[in-house]
Image: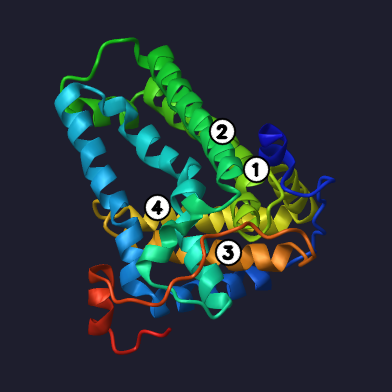
């Protein structure tokens, strides 16, 4: 029974959420709403996403110190493949703000107490597996072009990649394969995680709903993927610091995109821990420094 709930949710029959047809204008509106959420909850969003610059610096240190320089780009770009999992707290904050509930930072972690947590974990594990396969594929592409020897310096590595035929092949093939992985992840996660936070439908239903949403809106979702990719590149310069803004905005915007794509209906909502009386927390302190912050 527990496995059945993880796959198809709490209902007696698998749900089939209705999908809307959306346009590029809806993407702009979702981004605007995402920016508004970030504007209302800036310190919360930064708190949740500050890990991204830290991860970037850790990756750089590993590359420079342990001869995995060829994998630095695949690792950094591949984090977009697990971004939907990292943004779970942002989806929850947007959901709570939309419902007029308290949006303090502590509530971002209430997703781990949701009845949908098993389904969320199952989809998260799937994305982690895809991420691992991408890294292995990127390494195989590098080895096919340059062999197993590690570059002796950054200068040598950049010279080989940018000025040799093998380097050009690495760029073309590597980015082409990476695009396929990105399309796969976009297809299975475009609305699946927000759906699981909103309804107790199970991992299989959430995944199939996301696939149906992309199939119904192929051009619009392709544009959304390009927007996400471009913003992640911009946010990675310099030194991944920009991701402290880009990731929260994209996370909040994804929640609003889900609202536009999936029709509301009477599916069971995930059970969450009971609401407690509002209390001040040290995690909320920085928000008082932003007089424009909204509740």
Cα–Cα span, label 1 and label 3: 15 Å
* Element on which disc 4 rests: helix
Q: Earlier in the sequence, mark 1 or mark 4?
A: 1
Looking at the image, residue 215 lies above or below residue 268: above
Residue position marked by numbered label 3 in the rendering = 255
Q: Nearer the viewer, residue 287 or 179?
A: 287
* Element on which disc 3 rests: helix
Cα–Cα span, label 4 and label 2: 24 Å
Q: Residue 25 location, x and y as percent?
A: 67, 73
Residue position marked by numbered label 1 in the rendering = 188
Residue position marked by numbered label 4 in the rendering = 233
* Element on which disc 2 rests: helix
Q: Label 1: few (<14), some or many (≥20) within 10 Å?
A: many
Write the residue at 76% across / 67% down.
264
Q: Residue 249 location, x and y as percent?
A: 45, 66
* Element on which disc 1 rests: helix
Cα–Cα span, label 1 and label 2: 10 Å
Looking at the image, residue 174 lies above or below residue 210: above
Q: Nearer the viewer, residue 222 or 126?
A: 126
**Residue lying at the far bottom of the rendered structure:** 291
Mark 1–mark 2 CB contact (< 8 Å): yes
Q: Does residue 213 appear left or right of residue 12 in this picture?
A: left
Q: Mark 4 or 2, which is nearer the eye?
A: 2
Write the residue at 46% across / 55% down.
87
């Amino acid at each position: 029974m527990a496995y059945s709930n993880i796959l198809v949710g709490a209902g007696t029959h698998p749900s089939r959420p209705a999908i809307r047809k959306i346009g590029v204008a809806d993407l702009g509106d979702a981004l605007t709403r995402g920016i508004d959420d970030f504007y209302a909850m800036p310190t919360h969003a930064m708190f949740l996403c500050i890990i991204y610059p830290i991860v970037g610096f850790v990756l750089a240190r590993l590359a420079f110190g342990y001869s995995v320089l060829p994998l630095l780009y695949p690792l950094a770009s591949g984090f977009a493949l697990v971004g939907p999992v990292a943004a779970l707290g942002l989806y929850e904050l947007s959901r709570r703000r939309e419902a007029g509930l308290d949006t303090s930072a502590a509530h971002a972690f209430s997703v781990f107490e949701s009845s949908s947590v098993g389904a969320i974990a199952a989809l998260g594990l799937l994305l982690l597996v895809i991420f691992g396969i991408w890294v292995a594929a990127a390494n195989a592409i590098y080895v096919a072009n340059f062999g197993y020897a590690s570059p002796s310096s950054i200068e040598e590595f950049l010279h080989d990649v940018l000025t040799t035929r093998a380097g050009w092949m690495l760029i073309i093939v590597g980015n082409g394969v990476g695009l396929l992985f990105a399309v796969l992840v976009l297809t299975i996660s475009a609305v699946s995680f927000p759906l699981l936070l909103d309804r107790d439908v199970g991992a299989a239903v959430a995944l199939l709903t996301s696939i149906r949403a992309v199939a119904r809106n192929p051009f619009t979702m392709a544009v959304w993927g390009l927007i996400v990719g471009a913003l992640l590149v911009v946010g990675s310069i310099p030194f991944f610091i920009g991701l402290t803004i880009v990731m929260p905005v994209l996370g909040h915007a994804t929640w609003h995109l889900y609202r536009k794509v999936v029709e509301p209906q009477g599916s069971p909502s995930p059970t969450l821990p009971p609401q407690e009386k509002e209390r001040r927390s040290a995690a909320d302190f920085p928000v008082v420094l932003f007089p424009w912050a909204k509740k």
